């Protein structure tokens, strides 16, 4: 068999000394604690993005209105609000002859069923969707202003409540059916004055916790890798596996807890499909975060495998060695091109924000630098092949 057909083999290197028992316990404890904290950090980041970012809130509300089940329940709510506040039965009774007044409840019920269908068609229009999104945006901005202490005057003058004002939608329906609803019809209370202090504390915890936990997780993983001298590839592999595991756990949490949450909050079977749809829309950012962690974990595992002793990994490093030595710019340029293509695609939020781009870019090229150094040290005699 020719030498070209033989499996590539790396030059023999002395096996690293095993970690002391104390250091090994410390390193693996850091990895486990970091993985647990990463799960909580991910949930905190999701809550922060979904509940505290107005654009995310408004976008989710628009998706909810576009959902058939949710729009149907909203139509029922708006029509019930209109007919209750306008006292539709009494108005119909007044317009009927005295000997027909007893038919008013039957007519009101039939008209209410028709009104629900009409409301659903109205909510499908771009105008109604714009009103819905604007109402949600305004309510969310008011809520954040109150929680941040920027506009307590508005809170105090609104009977101590922050409300989602669906009055414009109720008004469109009242115009359609000739009923006059009071100005406060269609207002949904989001926050009462008695809940203000607890909500403000929760806001501070979420804001500080999301940043602090993320930095702490990165620090603990970095410290574990640093302390595992001679065994850093194993710890890097464990770190990547932690990302992958936490991502999978987030997907499981989203799937499993959805039924529990919806079942505990909604007791009526007819409304549960809308609740399930709302949960799915409200947790899209959580799923996006989970898939991002899974992707980062897969990339990390590939990097750990590439630096490992397997036949394929050694063969790849052996072929890269001459280019790392004599044409390193070509390798780094190819990696940079792939990175730019990923940024243009923007599959995760971190690839669309400056801090994420800097962090991912730094980690990627730090890993490439480590692979470069290790490959050149492993295959020092390799020369770049002359161009054909």
Image: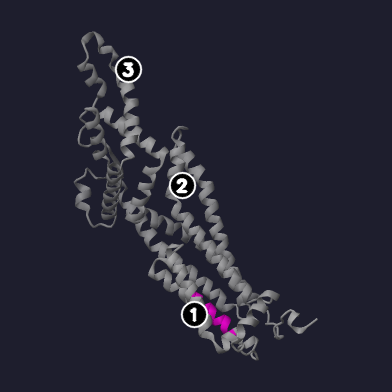
**Left or right: residue 64 compared with residue 134:** right
Eye-nearest disc, 1 or 2: 1
Q: Is residue 184 magenta?
A: no
**Residue occupying the point 35% across, 26% down:** 113
**Left or right: residue 142 compared with residue 373:** left
**Residue occupying the point 45% across, 64% down:** 345
Check disc 2 and report its element: helix, strand or loop. helix
Eye-nearest disc, 3 or 1: 1
Distance between the Cα atoms at labels 1 and 2? 41 Å
Check disc 3 and report its element: helix, strand or loop. helix
Residue 280 is marked as 2
Q: Decide if residue 26 is in sight here.
A: no
Tell me which corner region of the image, top left, top right, bottom left or bottom right, holds residue 56.
Answer: bottom left
Q: Which residues are magenta?
A: 363-373
Mark 3 — residue?
Answer: 106
> Which quadrant of the figure contains the C terminus?
bottom right
**Left or right: residue 341 compared with residue 373:** left
* Residues tagged 1 and 2 counted as in contact (Cβ below 8 A): no
Distance between the Cα atoms at labels 2 and 3? 38 Å
Mark 1 — residue?
Answer: 333
Q: Is residue 192 above or below residue 309?
A: above
Sequence-wise, the earlier of marks 3 and 1 is: 3
Check disc 1 and report its element: helix, strand or loop. helix
Tell me which corner region of the image, top left, top right, bottom left or bottom right, holds residue 187.
Answer: top left
Instruction: Residue lying at the far right in this picture: please name it.
Output: 1
Mark 1 residue crowding within 10 angstroms, few (<14) / some (14–19) / many (20+): few
Q: Magenta: predominant secondary structure element?
A: helix
């Amino acid at each position: 068999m020719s030498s070209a057909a033989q499996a590539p083999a790396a030059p023999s290197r002395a096996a690293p000394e095993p970690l002391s028992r104390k250091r090994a316990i410390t390193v693996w404890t850091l990895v486990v604690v970091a993985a647990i904290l990463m799960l909580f950090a991910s949930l905190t980041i999701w809550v922060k993005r979904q509940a505290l970012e107005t654009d995310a809130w408004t976008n989710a509300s628009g998706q909810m209105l576009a959902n058939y089940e949710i729009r149907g329940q909203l139509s029922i709510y708006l029509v019930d609000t209109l007919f209750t506040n306008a006292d539709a039965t009494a108005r119909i009774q007044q317009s009927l002859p005295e000997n027909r007044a007893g038919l008013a409840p039957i007519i009101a019920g039939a008209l209410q069923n028709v009104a629900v269908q009409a409301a659903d068609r109205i909510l499908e229009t771009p105008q109604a969707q714009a009103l819905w999104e604007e109402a949600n945006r305004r309510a969310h901005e008011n809520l954040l202003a109150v929680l941040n202490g920027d506009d307590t005057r508005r809170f105090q003058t609104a009977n101590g409540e922050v409300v989602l004002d669906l009055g414009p939608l109720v008004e469109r329906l009242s115009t359609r059916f000739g009923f006059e609803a009071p100005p406060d019809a269609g207002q949904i209370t989001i926050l009462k004055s008695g809940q203000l202090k607890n909500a403000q504390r929760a806001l501070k915890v979420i804001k500080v916790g999301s940043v602090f936990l993320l930095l702490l997780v990165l620090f603990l993983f970095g410290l574990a890798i640093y302390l595992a001298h001679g065994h850093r590839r194993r710890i890097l592999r464990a770190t990547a596996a932690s990302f992958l595991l936490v991502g999978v756990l987030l997907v499981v949490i989203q799937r499993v807890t959805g039924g529990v949450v919806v079942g505990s909050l909604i007791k009526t079977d007819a409304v549960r499909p809308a609740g399930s749809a709302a949960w799915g829309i409200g947790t899209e950012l959580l799923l996006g975060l989970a898939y991002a962690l899974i992707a980062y974990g897969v990339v990390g595992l590939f990097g750990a495998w590439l630096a490992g002793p397997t036949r394929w990994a050694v063969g790849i490093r052996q072929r890269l060695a001459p280019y790392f030595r004599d044409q390193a710019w070509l390798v780094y340029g190819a990696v940079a091109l792939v990175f730019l293509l990923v940024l243009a695609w923007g599959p995760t939020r971190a690839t669309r924000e400056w801090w994420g781009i800097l962090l991912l870019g730094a980690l990627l090229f730090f890993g490439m630098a480590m692979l470069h150094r290790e490959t050149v040290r492993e295959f020092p005699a390799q020369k770049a092949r002359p161009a054909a």
